[in-house]
């Protein structure tokens, strides 16, 4: 029989982490633990004001699926997700933490990494980026120099000096840049900025416009000098089709879509 536990933590950040709409200094997070008495699987979801994800709401959602999780005949992760999503699909953050924990426990029970159980390899794993939050240009340079040699940096933008930020950071590294405006620009700004950012070895622009501005992002998609990637505009699987013809790619975040199971799909 599986037992469900939750644990709250506060994660102090080395630097204040700012994006266009907020600043975070301590990140609350919820850990879901599933144990069969021998193995323990863990999953995690942080709180997020933009998506209304709080520790209290996540715990309440998980209490609704306890009887399913702790049933005498345990379900495999994908089966558990299908059952749980019917009850807590309105809280993808809680569903994600549960799904991650279920996969972690499943892998440990099988004695193999989950990616191997999925039939995958690590031969062609994409490089990850190191993210630099909004701050003064001087501090943003300092953050970059604290992590030298990274192949890709993602730079949070949405300020009055966005191009100056990228130009200054470019002086300190030849690495690929990605920029993320977190809904902080309008269409005209995004198009104009794309032309300058293309000259600075920026790979793509993430979520330049507010999520509801589909007309504006259509114009950016057509006129931008760089690819446009959706984040806030693509939350669940059902949003992917709508992004076709508006974005060149989507950012699949597990907490937004509800875990590894839908993320993999």
Image (cartoon, rainbow, N blue to C red):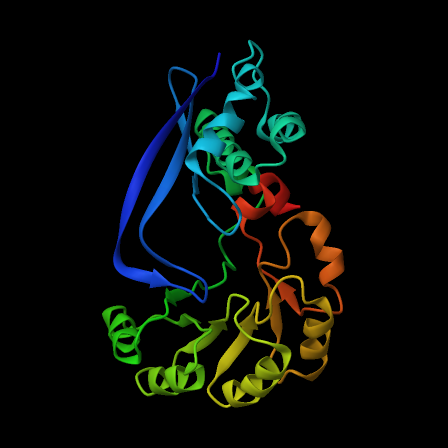
At x 58% / y 54%, what residue is drawn?
A: 252
Residue 189 image-quadrant placement: bottom right
Q: 226 or 50: which is nearer to us?
A: 50
Label count reads 0
The answer to whether residue 104 is visible is no
In the rendered view, does 39 fall on the left or right side of 137? right
In the rendered view, does 139 fall on the left or right side of 226? left
Picture coordinates of residue 110 (x, y %)? 48, 27
Picture coordinates of residue 66 (x, y %)? 52, 18
Q: In the rendered image of this protein, does residue 259 appear above or below residue 153?
A: above
Q: In the rendered image of this protein, does residue 225 appear above or below residue 76?
A: below
In the rendered view, does 262 fall on the left or right side of 134? right
Q: In the rendered image of this protein, does residue 86 appear above or below residue 212?
A: above
In the rendered view, does 198 fall on the left or right side of 224? left
The answer to whether residue 98 is visible is yes
At x 52% / y 43%, what residue is drawn?
A: 115
Picture coordinates of residue 155 (x, y %)? 42, 72
Residue 183 image-quadrant placement: bottom right
Q: 84 or 47: which is nearer to us?
A: 47
Picture coordinates of residue 143 (x, y %)? 27, 70
């Amino acid at each position: 029989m599986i037992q469900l536990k939750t644990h709250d933590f506060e994660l102090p950040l080395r630097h204040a982490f700012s994006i266009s709409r907020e600043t975070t200094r301590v990140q609350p997070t919820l850990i879901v633990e599933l144990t069969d008495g021998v193995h323990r699987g863990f999953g995690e979801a942080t709180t997020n004001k933009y998506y209304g994800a709080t520790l209290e709401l996540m715990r309440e959602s998980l209490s609704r699926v306890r009887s399913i999780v702790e049933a005498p005949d345990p379900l495999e992760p994908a089966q558990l997700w299908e059952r749980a999503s019917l009850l807590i699909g309105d809280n993808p953050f809680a569903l994600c933490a549960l799904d991650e924990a279920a996969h972690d426990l499943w892998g440990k029970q099988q004695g193999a990494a989950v990616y191997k159980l999925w039939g995958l390899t690590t031969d062609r794993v994409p490089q990850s980026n190191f993210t630099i939050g909004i701050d003064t240009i001087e501090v943003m340079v300092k953050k970059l120099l604290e992590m030298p040699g990274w192949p890709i940096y993602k730079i949070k933008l949405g300020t009055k000096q966005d191009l100056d930020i990228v130009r200054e950071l470019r002086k300190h590294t030849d690495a690929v840049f990605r920029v993320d405006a977190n809904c902080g620009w309008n269409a005209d700004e995004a198009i104009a900025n794309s032309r300058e950012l293309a000259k600075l070895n920026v790979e793509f622009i993430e979520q330049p416009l507010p999520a509801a501005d589909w007309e504006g992002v259509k114009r950016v998609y057509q006129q931008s000098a760089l690819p446009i990637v959706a984040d806030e505009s693509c939350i669940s699987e059902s949003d992917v089709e709508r992004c076709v013809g508006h974005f060149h790619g989507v950012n699949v975040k597990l907490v937004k879509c509800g875990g590894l199971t839908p993320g993999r799909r």
